[in-house]
């Protein structure tokens, strides 16, 4: 297969955001630890990245102390986010959500550890992606994916490039 | 390469949907890419709704998109849709896009069809004249 890959992009988190029967947001997936309403308004969510996420936390991995955050947080310049609405109860499965936006919350020295997601309907009103525990005309949940879009070559590999590292058999 | 990847995203479908005879009620719709064996307009929706059958010969077949508790709560699949614009400057006029994963009637098979629905504002079903791109991942 021809290799056209020029930019490594690595997935760091994915989830389906839904609303439970009590009206609280919840995330099902990997890479996020919690979700809360950012304000009292619907359609406004603050999602915290998992402390075990390698790109979001120096404390990732089984041998690190749980609760240690940074300094390897996800650089907001390198984060890539996809938001997709799942269809609702209006046949065949439309959504009223027109505006989906994500903003990254960064802490100096730590990087981005939270993502704020807002959803607005066609009337520009903040709106949940579904009803309390059930789909509604707005939709049936929100799919979220987050990538690290700058997973470039590491320094150790880059230093191995050069004439000093030519194989011995290539010399006369 | 530094490895920041912490969760698997496995692409099972990628392609572009176009309208070879132009957009309009019940005009033909075409999929070019991988992972989809058939594309059609669902009965009763001649505009703005597209039914994609996952390819049986790829990881998108039976069981790859594992069954959720209902067609709309399948937790194991993610989709990204990007609508292409047309004209100068390009515009699509598509205001909302939604995706649903339709369970096979055969128990245990999981979702074997994906439904994409698009509307303009004010809400009306509509085809994007320049088509749209789609990628589907299994994330479990």
Image: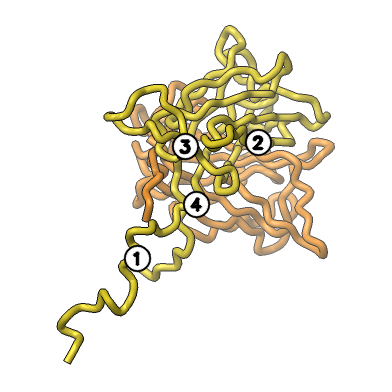
Chain colours: A yellow, B orange
Question: Residue sitting at 57 percent across and 9 percent down?
Answer: A21
As drawn, the residue found furthest toward the top would be A22
Judge by depth and name the residue closer to the eye, A74 or A100.
A74
Mark 2 residue element? strand
Give the Cα separation between the discs numbered 3 and 2. 20 Å
Give the Cα separation between the discs numbered 1 and 2. 35 Å
**Numbered tag placed on residue A120 in the rendering:** none
Q: Is A172 left or right of A51, judged from the image as shown?
A: left
- Please, which chain is the residue tagged with disc 1 on? A
Residue B31 quadrant: bottom right
- Please, which chain is the residue tagged with disc 3 on? A
- The first of marks 1 and 3 along the sequence is 3
Q: Which residue was labeled with disc 3? A: A71
Q: Which residue was labeled with disc 2? A: A103
Q: Which residue was labeled with disc 4? A: B38
Give the Cα separation between the discs numbered 1 and 3. 24 Å
Respond whether the residues carrying marks 1 and 2 are from the same subunit: yes
Respond whether the residues carrying marks 1 and 3 are from the same subunit: yes
> Residue A111, image x and y in percent?
54, 37
> Residue A50, image x and y in percent?
45, 28
């Amino acid at each position: 297969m021809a290799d056209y890959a020029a930019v490594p992009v690595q997935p760091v988190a994915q989830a389906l955001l839904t609303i439970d029967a009590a009206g609280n947001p919840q995330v099902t997936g990997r890479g996020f630890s919690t979700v809360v309403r950012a304000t009292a308004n619907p359609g406004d969510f603050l999602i915290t990245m998992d402390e075990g996420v390698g790109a979001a936390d120096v404390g990732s991995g089984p041998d690190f102390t749980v609760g240690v955050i940074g300094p390897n947080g996800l650089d907001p310049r390198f984060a890539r986010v996809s938001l997709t609405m799942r269809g609702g109860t209006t046949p065949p499965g439309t959504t009223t959500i027109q505006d989906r936006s994500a903003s990254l919350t960064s802490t100096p020295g730590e990087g981005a550890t939270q993502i704020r997601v807002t959803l607005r309907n066609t009337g520009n009103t903040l709106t949940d992606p579904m009803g309390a525990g059930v789909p509604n005309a707005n939709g049936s949940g929100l799919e979220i994916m987050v990538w690290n879009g700058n997973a470039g070559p590491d320094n150790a590999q880059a230093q191995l490039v050069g004439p000093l590292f030519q194989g011995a058999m290539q010399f006369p | 390469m530094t490895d920041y990847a912490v969760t698997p995203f496995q692409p099972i479908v990628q392609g572009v949907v176009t309208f070879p005879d132009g957009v309009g009620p019940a005009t033909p719709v075409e999929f070019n890419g991988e992972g989809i064996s058939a594309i059609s307009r669902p009965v009763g929706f001649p505009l703005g709704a597209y039914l994609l059958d996952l390819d049986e010969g790829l990881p998108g077949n039976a069981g790859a998109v594992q069954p959720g508790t209902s067609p709309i709560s399948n937790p194991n699949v993610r989709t990204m849709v990007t609508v292409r614009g047309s004209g100068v400057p390009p515009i699509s006029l598509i205001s909302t896009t939604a995706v649903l994963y339709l369970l096979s009637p055969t128990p245990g098979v999981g979702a074997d069809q994906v439904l994409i629905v698009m509307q303009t504002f004010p809400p009306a079903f509509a085809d994007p004249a320049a088509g749209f791109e789609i990628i589907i991942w299994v994330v479990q």
